[in-house]
Image: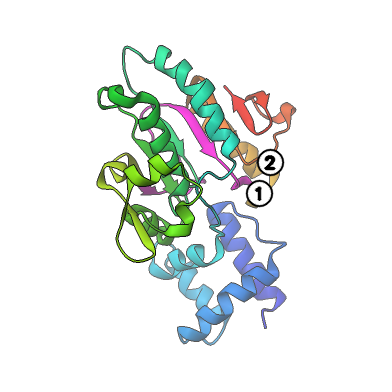
Amino acid sequence: MLSDHEFQRIVSYVKGNYGIDLSQKRILVDGRLKNYLLRNGYSGYDEYMEEVESNPGGKEAKNLVNILTTNHTYFMRESEHFDFLQQVVLPQLKVKEAARKDLRIWSAASSTGEEPYTLAMILMDFFGLEHKQWDTTVLATDISTQVLEHASKGVYLKEQLEVLPPKWKNHYFKKIGTEEYQATEELRKEVLFRQFNLMNRFPFRRKFHVVFLRNVMIYFEEDTKYGLLDKIYDFMEPGGYLFIGTTESLNKGRTRFNYVQPSIYRK
């Protein structure tokens, strides 16, 4: 059984290193870690945390994040965002960036890849024959190496693709088994997957036109959340758009972003 001391030790480590607040997630922490500890021969949570804390860049520290971060996503999730991107944002950016032909879009909690691949398909669809003249590579980052490995392979079950328009499914995915499809090389080349901790210093050389930061701030305390939003604001182009989860909202008094409509903000 996970003791108070052990639980607080895990909560403190995860919050201090990743900004994620698990203080109300005791059942989740116990449920997800218990079997892992048993399978890997640890005598208890303290022995496991000794290993994690003594080697923050090591295998067990990475495993801890992979085990505890929830990665539930699917294609076309919160589809109103994709409609807005296609109908409002991209026409504006096509005019604004006509000379440079360089669009910088960041999927900042990309999970298993459904969001960034959807963005890439929208971009290819929108630009059509002109697409090859533009640099529209989507940067997709996540804290979990496990989900990024899955995402970079681009393999999904048949039913996961059912929500996609048939022309996308037929053009951008190929059947590789009875129930599995893989994103084509053409589509995979349009997304750059990288492991990144949102609490770290931002290494980006150029500013973003669009940032998708959906359903990740629910794991952060308010100060952490608005600190992250400040960093993102500074790394966005003037007029750039921020998309957050449809169940999330921002306090107008604590952010420099301007409200556009529910879950969509602009610099």
Name the spot of residue 237 as percent of width and height, x first. Answer: 47, 21
Which residue is disc 2 drawn over?
Answer: 248
Q: Is residue 11 magenta?
A: no
219 lies left or right of 120: right
145 and 50: which one is in front?
Answer: 145
102 and 37: which one is in front?
Answer: 102
Magenta stretch bounds: 193-217
Main SS, magenta region, reads loop
Name the residue type under label 1: Ile
Give the quadrant of the N terminus: bottom right
Name the spot of residue 144 as percent of width and height, x first. Answer: 45, 57
Q: Residue at x 48, y 51 (%)?
A: 162
Corner quadrant of residue 190: top left
Do the residues under discs 2 and 1 have CB atoms within 8 angstroms? yes
Is residue 216 visible in the rendered structure shown here? yes
- In this view, which residue lies farthest toward the front? 166
Say what secondary structure mark 2 lies in.
loop
